[in-house]
Amino acid sequence: MSDAARFARTLGALGVLTLVLNGCATETRNVDNDVGDPGYSGMVSAREYGYVRPATDVVVMERRTAGRQDPRGDLWNRVRSGMKLDLHADSRIDSTVDRFRRDPQYLARMSQQATPYLHVIVTEIERRGLPMELAFLPHVESRFNPTATSPKAAAGIWQFMPYTGLEMGLRQDAWYDGRRDPLASTGAALDYLEQLNRRFDGDWTLAMAAYNCGPGRIASAQEANRRSGKPTDYWSLNLPNETKQYVPQILATARLVAEPRRYGMNLPPVPDRPQVEIVRSLQPVDLQRVASATGVQLYELQRLNPALKLGRTAPDGPGHVLVPAGTGQRIGKSMGKVQIMPAMASLAPSRSAPASARSRTARIEQHKSHVVKGGETVATIARANGIEPRALAELNSISVREPLLPGQTLKVQATADTALITHLVTTGDSIKTLAKRYGVSVKDLRRWNRLADNRLSPGDLILIYPPGRTPTS
């Protein structure tokens, strides 16, 4: 399935309003916020999931949620009805429930933190037919905070590492970080969880554990148990302490939500309706200009759009922003004529998406494999392939020090274009130092990565082509 189709599939079930604006923003300063990265197996970018061709000044498209949505109801009821896992599977869940109960405000805080994005998450989980317990994963990961960043550079409500985010199609550049886009990252996270679930034969506890510590670590622990004649289910594995606590935290929270009164807890309701709308523009969008034109608070727009690093979408194409539910029509009216159209028109893949955007993601996602030999480590394999151990570990969702098994297969580097180098920016890196290190010009670095200036931030991923080689389209 194409990235465009994935994004269309995800948006189709979100229950948000989608507005396409022709002329919302202005000049070259504006950025292109790729809504597309929802993470559908990774939303990639607005350019990749497509745009509606401009018919008039503004096109407003409304779609109703294909579920049990009740604007007057409590969204937690849909969460309860969708739970499928065993919430009493292990004593670790019991002890975690007891620990969470000591804080009388635990569920109240979670309900407040989840409100902006829970409707999106629940609707997409329902559409895919997945267990609703997965809706608590971003609570354990980030407290539903899209600006959250871990010491290891994981970001967003689903805490994607940079390389994993790229693997799932989340664009990351100087303008936009799809890991912090709540819509993009939700689609990507659920795609990733579905992949992990298939890898571990439909066991959701193993899939959730692998989301935390990496599928390689889970597979290694299972192999160790097999050699010892022990069971290979999640509860029997020898895993890092964080992972041992991770799944019980998710399932304990689910149990408290399922029966809050039984445990003497207060769970404030969450309205069963979309909390955000999507404004998609055929021109770049500047949050400050949107705020000035509509009266929507700039702070609110910034809060909903942490994926826009500079507060505006990229200057070389269309863009999108999230706005509070109920404000989309106001924005549309401030921009000109409004026309009501079928929702699916806005989700049709565009044939005019720039080839550079599509091909760049494709190159990153294609890798050659390395079969581990006895005695090899992450560090030795990384050195042999000319990449950093940390990059290799992140690429395979394992830790740098994780023991490898003979016969295990690792992805090591892109093969579609052997000249392509991906560099993860760390503290102290600059455009000039990277240009000097890799023997390329500052001008080329900026062009390849669509940088508006020379500023870099730790966690950015920079694409580099050695001298004499140019990117393929």
Image: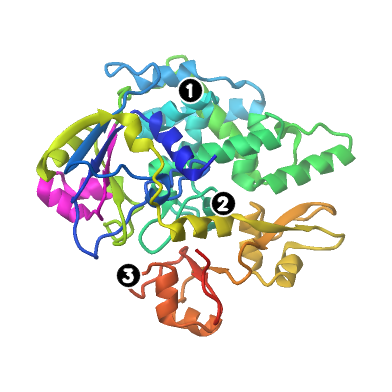
Tell whether 338 sits left or right of 429: left
Disc 2 marks which amino acid? Glu
Tell me which label, 1 or 3, sits earlier in the chain: 1
The answer to whether 195 is drawn above or below residue 73 in the figure is below
> Would residue 298 be counted in the magenta stretch?
yes
In the image, which residues are magenta?
Answer: 275-302
Is label 1 in a helix, a strand or a loop? helix
**Residue highlighted by disc 3:** 452
Percent from the top left, x then y, of residue 105? Answer: 37, 30
Residue placed at 37% from the left, 21% from the top?
75
Gap in angstroms between the C-alphas marked 3 and 2: 25 Å
Residue placed at 42% from the left, 18% from the top?
78
Does the rendering let one see residue 295? no
Disc 1 marks which amino acid? Leu
Tell whether 117 sits left or right of 214: left
Q: Nearer the viewer, mark 1 or mark 3?
A: 3
Percent from the top left, x then y, of residue 131? Answer: 55, 24
Is label 2 in a helix, a strand or a loop? helix
**Residue highlighted by disc 1:** 256
